[in-house]
Image (cartoon, coloured by chain):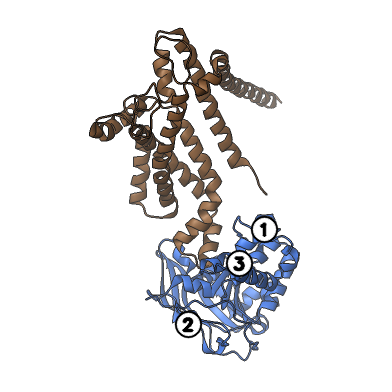
Chain colours: A brown, B blue
Amino acid sequence: MFRLMRRRMTSAVMFAMTGICTVVVIGALFFILGYLFWKGGRYVNWDFFTKLPAPVGEAGGGMANAIIGSAKLLLLATLIGMPIGFLGGVYLAEYGGKTFPFMVRYVTDLLNGVPSIVIGIFAYTVVVLKVRHFSAWAGGFALGIMMIPIALRSTEEFLRQVPNGLREAALALGAARWQMILTVVVPAALRGIVAGMMLDVARVAGETAPLLFTSFGNRFWSEGFDKPTASLPVMIFNYAIGPYEDWHRQAWAAGFVLLAMVFMFNVTARLLVSWRRH
Amino acid sequence: MPINVPIPDEQADGQADMLADGRVDLAGAPLPVQAADGHGPAIVCSRSFCLYYGSRVGVKDIDMEIYPRSVTSIIGPSGCGKSTFLRSINRMNDLVPGARASGVLEVNGQDVYDKRINLVNLRQQVGMVFQRPNPFPKSIFDNVAYGPRIQGIRRAARLEEVVERCLIQAALWGEVKDDLRKSALSLSGGQQQRLCIARALATGPKVLLMDEPCSALDPVATARIEELIAALKNDYTMVIVTHNMQQAARVSDRTAFFCLGELIEVGLTRDIFTAPKKRQTEDYVTGRFG
């Protein structure tokens, strides 16, 4: 009888503790969201999305160029990181072997752990120093490298989740290995792979350090990809440490917009994976 | 130049078109009916065939013949090599790392373990249905059309014709004809297995291998598949692995009894079940061990 009471009490205590931890975590998230919304949400207005930054010292202006710039950089990063990550993931999941796949996985995980500023320095050396100017190419290159490990591992994970029965069925019907992968395995895993890519983009969207000396920043529009390009994280960085109150307000607003974008990507990715069509 | 599995003379009805690169055009009409007892030359023939998984023996010294347009069942206790032998016929064992074969295993006179064999062609000629239904997460139409599409057939009219013919042969047409675009995963287990049979038939195989096709199905679905097997016997050669002896007695013309990786006895089904020659066979079919 006493044992039963003790078990019940332990269960209750553990339940309470997990409940408290859950509340703390969710509370922290809501606190950040709420604080950002309160501090920055009220300064998000039409100007923010459509105007260029005002001359230094003047109030007003917006971050239109930073939003477009971030979009350009993320587009480049996706074009660089996604194919490499996807094909690498396909290789690891579908083709066997012991040593080479092991090395690929290990190196990928190492790359994932490299500090983002070091990746920025690498992009600086390889791209910026060669052409002697900052550009969106360099920034996109740095972000693309950061995208590879996550894209690769997430693609591999989702491909592994495809049941082997489908592979056997395709091969037994006379499909060559590449046909099986292209027409059966990848389509079966596609929603997960796309969701993984979206999460990858969302993660990379907020990276500031690698952009500081690759795309550098720009107070005006940048035509094409060969000029220094503004981006939201770098703008936040510059404005937050600046001396003007108006700049601080705009930095909060930018932080809110960035968070909202990341949030939307995350939710879409989750919906993609869990939405059951049948 | 990879070798294709040849079409045996007595089955070449002149109506199936052989394309220049060895593919068989699926327009061929059903093959003429031939009684199983008056069997012609074997369509699948193994001589001292062994398959090893690394150092472990899968099957050893199998001498067996499978005759055209008949149903041959392979029975035996778990782990005796039935599925291993079946999967060797269309070289699905290649998927297991460390699998190697010795001896001869011929389909239509062509050794399938010849290094030069065209695996794609072999698997189109020798179809397979698996234990658990494994339809692709695509529409019913796309599932059945998968084989022909892989072969390069693109014209919608041809594909529709093949899909309809195979679904009729698999006794599924009536149930799905209203909406072929529906996802295959929305079908019941028995329907999915019939879909897998239709899918296997769509490549125009001569031999159909079935690895315990009913073990994941309820008795009603099982009965329908057995009816299907009886109907398909006229046009296809079937090899069925089953752990259900009564099913073997119901559907097959010839039965092979495997035990611990070896072929103990093979012969007409009624002989195996009523007058087996080997003591081990008798013990198994009477239920003394299993």
A18 up-or-down from A202: above or below: above
Tag count? 3
**Element at label 3:** helix
Q: In the figure, is residue B144 to the left or right of B42?
A: right
Label 1 and label 2: CA atoms lie apart by 35 Å
**Element at label 1:** loop
Residue A200 position in % (x across, y down): 46, 36
Chain bearing tag 3 is B
Looking at the image, which is closer to me, A68 or B29?
A: A68
The disc, 3 or 2, on the residue closer to the chain's N-terminal end is 2
Front disc: 1 or 3 = 3
Q: In the figure, is residue A5 to the left or right of B85?
A: right
Say which residue label 3 marks.
B156
Residue B73 position in % (x across, y down): 61, 76
Label 1 and label 3: CA atoms lie apart by 14 Å
Front disc: 1 or 2 = 1
Front disc: 3 or 2 = 3
Say which residue label 1 marks.
B181
A246 up-or-down from A18: above or below: above
